């Protein structure tokens, strides 16, 4: 019942802007929408409803609640930054309202992915995120956004159709059509190993378009490039996390599959290292700050996939990595959105001298780069060291060497670009009136939270991750 | 009865690979919807009104009427007619036959007592045909057809495996796919209006 009320309220609030006439009323509705998310989370935690089944297909487990909290935090900042972004772009009121509506509907679809306790319904909600994302990607209505939107819908739909095949093969083990994760986990060891392997392969490949890992990462990169910068922050974090949660639930399910699980983990390592390689290669090539950050997401999700594949302490690190990446990457996308107003461009080769133009924004971006590169006290330093130590303990030296080489390329590429933005001479037209230090400060707030997490992980965070990785 | 319908379905896939008119391809898709309806009804062991109703909606209404109608609407609005002239029909036919042989081999390799292997093989062939259409054809509309062929293959595979999802889940899946098709159709029209072409070569402007 609680879930039904939450869904009805969220959907009603999401579509409400369409019936309104002013931007101010839209902002009030957006604030109410965020408030509903906060209240839902607080009620879940205060009334000890964690791990309860709702509406037969949802379960509020720790994994879902943690990622819902992260999504709500990013959503709040996204709505705040979107307002100034849309005003600077001079969009019509209709476009303004539709943007907020689609963004909120996307948030509802993503939260449903997090809470879904049914393997088929996870698929349905992921497909719903594709449809909602399409509206956001096309929002700027220029030639590139049309191309990116088409590719996004088409590749995601085809990829997710492949994942559906995997779900069909996986469901051969289901008794009486019970497709909830717990029931499937009880019987998965009885399944045909070949079917289970093919199912895992198809599901991971299909969902890779959401988690932005190899092989279908390209559509996510194009989507982030075409969407408005604040929406890119949301897509690159909350939606990527939806992909991660979906894959993690399947991964947890396979933990009971014996030999097949070992195979599945090897597959994840392979996908992870290929994602890392792709990220490293394209971070060197790209000339656009939004694509640059998107390839960094591919690289980071590659590290996460390797963490899942290695298991042990690396599993803990992988979950923590995703959580911290959400805070860092959203902060950096918001900073890039502010840059766009000043330079009217995302071109890496043309824009520069940011340190003298917007010192707060430049420091925020540089600091974000350092955190992203896992320099201490970055939380990503802790996660990567944990993953490396587990790789060493299992004796996968080839993996360690490959990762270190690729990460050196990543560090060289990212740091070079960041310095270029701060100190290189600018060749583009400047709009100095667009400098908004308050927005730069607000974006940096997420980064500060991430750095604090790098220095000190509160007990509740540690306990939550422990509960999430308890998959045996 | 089922076997003859299945053979007919395989023939539609072969014909689809070589057909060069989008109207023809759309009509074949409608025919596939009818065949899937026949196959699903013939496989029903006993009469369940709800299950029967769902099959009618999903195959007869959705796959045989609504989707072909949307495709015809897009064809009429965009005035696209045939696949790209440089696409080789012979090449497509050869690829399709290779896919058929590959499907048979994979089916033999994956043989399982719980799965209907004839259905499994045909479903796999449908999936490969869809992928071939997407990879080999240059026009975006052909990609849409390929996607729908894959969706039909998925429907056949669900019958091969004998999975019966709850009605709510089936409905949600069906609605999701319908909305995707409508949105893809809308964007195809927009592309025709704004880029004035529906060739994939025009979709390469986003680069690093």
Image: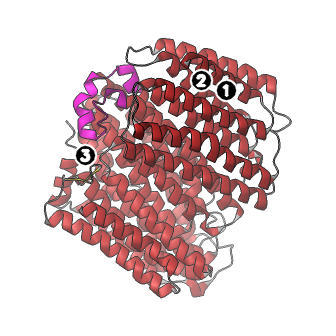
Task: Please state the horizontal and vertical placement of residue B116, each as a whole percent of the image.
Answer: 45, 18
Tell me the mark number nearer the camera, choosing from 3 and 2.
2
Q: Is residue B141 left or right of residue A41?
A: right
Residue denoted by label 1 = B13
Do tags 3 and 1 sit on the same chain? no
Tell me the mark number nearer the camera, choosing from 3 and 1.
1
Q: Nearer the viewer, residue B1 or A435?
A: B1
Q: Nearer the viewer, residue B182 or B95?
A: B182
In percent of the image, x 47 and y 64: which residue is there?
A: A233
Observer able to see residue A273: no
Tell me the mark number nearer the camera, choosing from 2 and 1.
1
Q: For the magenta stretch, what is the residue range?
A: A171-197
On what subunit does the disc labeled 3 rest? A
Q: What is the C-alpha distance between the residues marked 3 and 2?
A: 41 Å
In percent of the image, x 34 and y 20: which residue is there?
A: A192
Do tags 2 and 1 sit on the same chain? yes
**Image mark for residue B125:** 2
On what subunit does the disc labeled 1 rest? B
For the N terminus of chain B, the image quarter is top right
Pointer 3 local density, CA inside 10 Å: few below 14, some 14–19, many at least 20 = many
Q: Nearer the viewer, residue B26 or A131?
A: B26
Residue denoted by label 3 = A316
């Amino acid at each position: 019942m609680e879930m039904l009320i939450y869904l009805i309220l969220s959907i009603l609030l999401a579509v409400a802007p369409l019936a309104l006439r002013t931007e101010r009323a839209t902002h009030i509705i957006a604030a109410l929408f965020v408030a509903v998310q906060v209240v839902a989370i607080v009620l879940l935690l205060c009334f000890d409803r964690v791990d309860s089944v709702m509406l037969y297909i949802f379960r509020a487990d720790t994994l879902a609640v943690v990622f819902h909290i992260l999504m709500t935090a990013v959503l709040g900042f996204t709505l705040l930054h979107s307002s100034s972004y849309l005003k600077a772009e001079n969009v019509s009121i209709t476009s303004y309202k539709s943007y907020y509506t689609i963004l909120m509907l996307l948030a509802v679809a993503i939260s449903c992915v997090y809470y879904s306790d049914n393997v088929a319904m996870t698929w349905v909600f992921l497909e719903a995120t594709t449809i909602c994302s399409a509206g956001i990607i096309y929002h700027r209505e220029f030639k590139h956004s049309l191309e990116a939107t088409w590719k996004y819908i088409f590749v995601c739909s085809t990829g997710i159709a492949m994942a559906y095949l995997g779900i069909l093969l996986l469901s051969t083990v289901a008794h009486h059509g019970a497709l909830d994760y717990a029931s499937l986990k009880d019987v998965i060891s009885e399944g045909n190993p070949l079917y289970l392997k093919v199912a895992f392969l198809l599901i991971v490949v299909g969902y890779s378009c959401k988690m932005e890992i190899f092989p279908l990462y390209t559509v996510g990169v194009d989507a982030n490039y075409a969407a408005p910068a604040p929406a890119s922050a949301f897509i690159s974090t909350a939606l990527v996390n939806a992909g991660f949660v979906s894959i993690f639930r399947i991964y947890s399910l396979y933990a009971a599959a014996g030999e097949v699980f070992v195979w599945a983990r090897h597959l994840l390592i392979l996908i992870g290292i290929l994602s890392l390689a792709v990220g490293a290669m394209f971070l060197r090539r790209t000339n656009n700050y939004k694509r640059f950050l998107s390839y960094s997401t591919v690289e980071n999700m590659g590290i996460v996939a390797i963490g899942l594949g290695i298991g042990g302490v690396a599993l803990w690190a992988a979950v923590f990595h995703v959580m911290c990446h959400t805070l860092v990457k959203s902060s950096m996308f918001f900073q890039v959105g502010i840059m766009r107003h000043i330079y009217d461009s995302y071109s890496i080769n043309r824009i520069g001298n940011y340190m003298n133009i917007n010192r707060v924004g430049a420091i925020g971006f540089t600091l974000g780069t350092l955190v992203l590169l896992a320099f201490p006290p970055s939380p990503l330093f802790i996660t990567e060291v944990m993953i490396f130590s587990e790789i060493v303990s299992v004796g996968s030296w080839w993996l360690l060497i490959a990762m270190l080489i690729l990460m050196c390329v990543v560090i060289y590429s990212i740091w070079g670009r960041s310095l270029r933005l701060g100190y290189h001479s600018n060749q583009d037209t400047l709009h100095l009136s667009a400098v908004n230090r308050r927005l730069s400060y607000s974006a940096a707030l997420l980064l500060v939270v991430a750095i604090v997490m790098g220095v000190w992980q509160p007990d509740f965070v540690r306990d939550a991750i422990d509960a999430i990785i308890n998959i045996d | 009865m089922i076997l003859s319908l299945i053979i007919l379905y395989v023939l539609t896939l072969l014909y689809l690979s070589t057909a060069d008119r989008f109207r023809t391809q759309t009509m074949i898709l409608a025919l596939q919807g009818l065949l899937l309806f026949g196959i699903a009804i013939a496989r029903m062991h006993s009469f369940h009104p709800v299950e029967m109703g769902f099959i009618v909606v999903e195959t007869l209404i959705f796959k045989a009427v609504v989707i072909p109608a949307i495709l015809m609407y897009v064809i009429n609005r965009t005035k696209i007619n045939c696949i790209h002239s440089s696409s080789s029909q012979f090449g497509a036919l050869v690829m399709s036959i290779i896919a058929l042989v590959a499907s048979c081999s994979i089916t033999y390799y994956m043989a399982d007592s719980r799965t209907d292997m004839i259905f499994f093989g045909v479903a796999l062939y449908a999936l490969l045909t869809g992928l071939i259409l997407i990879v080999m054809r240059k026009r975006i509309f052909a990609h849409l057809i390929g996607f729908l062929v894959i969706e039909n293959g998925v429907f056949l595979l669900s019958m091969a495996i004998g999975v019966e999802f709850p009605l709510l889940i089936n409905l949600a899946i069906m609605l999701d796919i319908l909305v995707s098709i409508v949105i893809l159709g809308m964007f195809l029209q927009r592309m025709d209006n704004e880029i004035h072409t529906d060739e994939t070569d025009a979709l390469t402007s986003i680069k690093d």
